[in-house]
Amino acid sequence: MSDKPSYLSLLNAIAFNESRAYEYLQVWIATTDDPEVKEVLRTVAAREGEHGMTFAKRINELGYEVREREDQGLRERIPIAGSTDISDIEKFERFGLHDQEKLLSYFDDIFKDHSIDVRTGELLGRYVAEEHDSCRMLRGCYERLVARAGASRGSAVA
């Protein structure tokens, strides 16, 4: 009988995806000229990187290692994030960071596995709370950019 936690793949997905998000957000930070976008992205990127490392650490504490997965779009995101020909508004839209409801729906079932241990549950709770706050920050930044641009929400090319 295996002692492998049933939620190990969830932890792995979080560790992997958060680390990849950190990478493309760092590229975006380096190319935006907007101080508010930089500030918001720095906070979100720091959280993403920390989540990636924290969940990798938890996986190690459980006796396993993060398993690398397919790129999940990072190769496509890096050039977009680094482009000076694509506006910050369009980057928000291309990355789906303007759609708070869609982003937050990823967390709806995170605690359905009732075998999650206390330490992992603590970590997941903090992660979900920070992701909710990051989504609010990103949405607010996007809305202010759109308002400043005089465009209506959702009118830029997706």
Image (tube, rainbow, N blue to C red):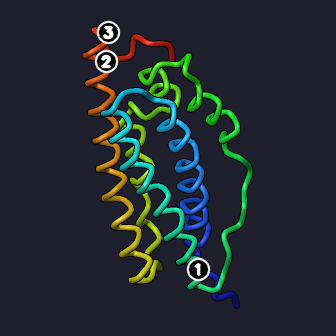
The kind of secondary structure element at disc 2 is helix
Residue shown at the point (55%, 72%) measured from the top left: 7
Relative horizontal placement of residue 151, taking residue 46 as reference (left or right): left
Q: How many marks?
A: 3
Residue at mark 1 to residue at mark 3: CA–CA distance = 48 Å
The residue carrying pointer 3 sits among few (fewer than 14), some (14 to 19) or many (20 or more) residues within 10 Å by Cα, namely few
The disc, 1 or 2, on the residue closer to the chain's N-terminal end is 1
- Residue under pointer 3: 151
Q: Nearer the viewer, residue 46 or 107?
A: 46
Q: Which of the 4 image quadrants contains residue 117?
A: bottom left
Of badges 1 and 3, the one in the foreground is 3
Q: Residue furthest bottom?
A: 1
The disc, 3 or 2, on the residue closer to the chain's N-terminal end is 2
- Residue under pointer 1: 5
- Residue under pointer 2: 146
Marks 3 and 2 in Cβ contact (< 8 Å): yes
Q: Quadrant of the N terminus?
A: bottom right
The kind of secondary structure element at disc 3 is loop
Q: Position of residue 79 (x, y in %)?
A: 65, 30
